[in-house]
Image (cartoon, rainbow, N blue to C red):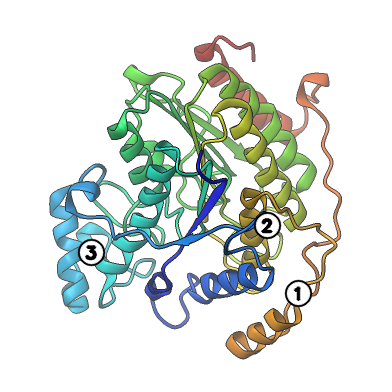
């Protein structure tokens, strides 16, 4: 490896803007980038990462996942938003069309593809694109604030480059449905999604019985968490499912999606996870990459709509972990960043890099409660997919 980590960033990604009042406010990206800078995580030297802007994903790359007619529809809507075709999920309440939509969506996708290429070619061990993680986009339609599916495109590019086994772990509060759909029948890709139960949250998919197509049985893994799940349950579920499956699958690259919308302050969902638990999962993903993939780790952002209080801190922790310079949770946020928060959002910034929690969990293999809804969810997933990987439920 010629370097430890890389941050993929182009200022133009903040142009991914569905308009005033839309939950996907690009200020969350700008404030994350500002906090990363305030902690001096970028640049040359130990504990710092170079910032690299990759090219936008081109037509041939986009076609690795998306249908040509859909790409054409995005281009048309990008040039003339009023012409957006709702049949492709464009011009909807979730995905309003805006001028330049194709260009900025392709740019975000390009950062994730560039991250995958850098990791695969050994230029770096880890690469982070917190503007990415747009996991709902389907081959032929926009969905859930997502136009192009950059996680799926990064994985598809890894396969094109010769990867034989890629694992994808998605801890966004919403099911990673678009990535699952892209690789439903591909035994080279293991998709694992931990999300709020589809009974209570968009996109109403991600049941434990969704386990992959006939050619890839057990290749899709879904942990449907009860609404209200907090730190202990979330971490218990993660550790009961993810590490044993990665050990059995033996991936060559780990791609992870770190949507921050599991947080108890998030306005669009119903889990009760803290910033500290989110940091703990990012740390676990980092460790799992070193354990199973020789450190090859592509880490992406995702959802997250508490755009000041949560998202910037969560993703700054992610960048710091990738850089090998983890930020202690009790650390105060830099004063200059607090001023930037007020300037951009006209609200007070959080004062520390923690919610004041110390996340702990009980190991599932030490015993479970058959009457507990969380344990029922974990067991349903393990029963559905563990036998396909030679594991006991």
Query: Quadrant where the C terminus lies?
Result: top right
How far, Cα to Cα, is label 2 from label 1? 14 Å
Kindly identify which residue carries mark 1.
350
Q: Residue, x 16% and y 74% (percent of image)? A: 83
Query: Is 107 displayed left or right of 391 in the figure?
Result: left
Q: Is residue 246 above or below residue 110?
A: above
Callout 2: few (<14), some (14-19), or many (20+) C-alpha neighbours within 10 Å?
A: many
Whether residue 91 is visible to the viewer of this picture, yes or no, is no
Query: Is 201 displayed left or right of 79 in the figure?
Result: right
Closer to us: mark 3 or mark 2?
Answer: 2
Q: Which mark is residue 317?
A: 2
Q: Position of residue 241 (x, y in %)?
A: 63, 28
Helix, strand or loop at disc 3? Answer: helix
Q: Residue, x 74% and y 35% (percent of image)? A: 236
The answer to which image quadrant residue 318 occupies is bottom right
**Camera-side residue: 233 or 53?**
53
The answer to which image quadrant residue 263 occupies is bottom right
Callout 1: few (<14), some (14-19), or many (20+) C-alpha neighbours within 10 Å?
A: some
Q: Earlier in the sequence, mark 3 or mark 2?
A: 3
Q: Which mark is residue 149?
A: none
Helix, strand or loop at disc 1? Answer: loop
Q: Residue, x 70% and y 83% (percent of image)? A: 336
Q: Residue, x 40% and y 51% (percent of image)? A: 112
């Amino acid at each position: 490896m010629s370097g430890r980590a890389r941050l993929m960033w182009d200022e133009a990604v903040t142009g991914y803007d569905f308009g005033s009042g839309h939950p996907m406010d690009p200020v969350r990206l700008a404030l994350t980038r500002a906090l990363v800078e305030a902690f001096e995580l970028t640049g040359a030297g130990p504990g710092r990462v170079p910032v690299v802007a990759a090219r936008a994903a081109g037509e041939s790359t986009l076609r690795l996942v998306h249908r040509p007619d859909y790409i054409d529809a995005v281009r048309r809507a990008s040039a003339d938003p009023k012409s957006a075709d709702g049949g492709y999920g464009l011009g909807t309440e979730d995905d309003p069309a805006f001028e330049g939509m194709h260009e900025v969506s392709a740019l975000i996708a390009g950062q994730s593809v560039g991250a995958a290429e850098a990791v695969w070619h050994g230029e770096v061990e880890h690469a982070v694109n917190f503007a990415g993680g747009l996991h709902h986009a389907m081959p032929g339609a926009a969905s859930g604030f997502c136009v192009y599916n950059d996680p799926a495109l990064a994985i598809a590019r890894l396969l094109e480059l010769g990867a034989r086994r890629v694992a994808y772990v998605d801890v966004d509060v919403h099911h990673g449905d678009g990535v699952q759909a892209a690789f439903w029948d591909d035994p080279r890709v293991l998709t694992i999604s931990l999300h709020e139960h589809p009974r209570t949250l968009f996109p109403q998919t991600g049941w434990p019985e969704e386990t992959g197509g006939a050619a890839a049985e057990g290749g899709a893994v879904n942990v449907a968490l009860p609404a209200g799940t907090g730190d202990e349950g979330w971490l218990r579920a993660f550790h009961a499912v993810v590490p044993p499956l990665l050990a059995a699958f033996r991936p060559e690259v780990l791609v992870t999606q770190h949507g921050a919308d599991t947080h108890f302050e998030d306005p669009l969902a119903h889990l009760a996870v803290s910033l500290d638990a989110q940091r703990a999962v990012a740390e676990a993903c980092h460790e799992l990459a070193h354990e199973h993939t020789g450190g090859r780790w592509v880490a992406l952002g995702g959802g997250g709509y508490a755009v000041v209080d949560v998202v910037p801190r969560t993703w700054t922790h992610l960048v710091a972990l990738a850089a090998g310079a983890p930020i202690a949770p009790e650390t105060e946020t830099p004063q200059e960043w607090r001023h930037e928060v007020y300037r951009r959002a006209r609200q007070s910034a959080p004062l520390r890099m923690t919610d004041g929690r110390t996340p702990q969990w009980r190991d599932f293999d030490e015993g479970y409660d058959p009457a507990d809804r969380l344990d029922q969810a974990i067991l349903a997933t393990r029963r559905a997919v563990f036998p396909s990987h030679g594991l006991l439920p």
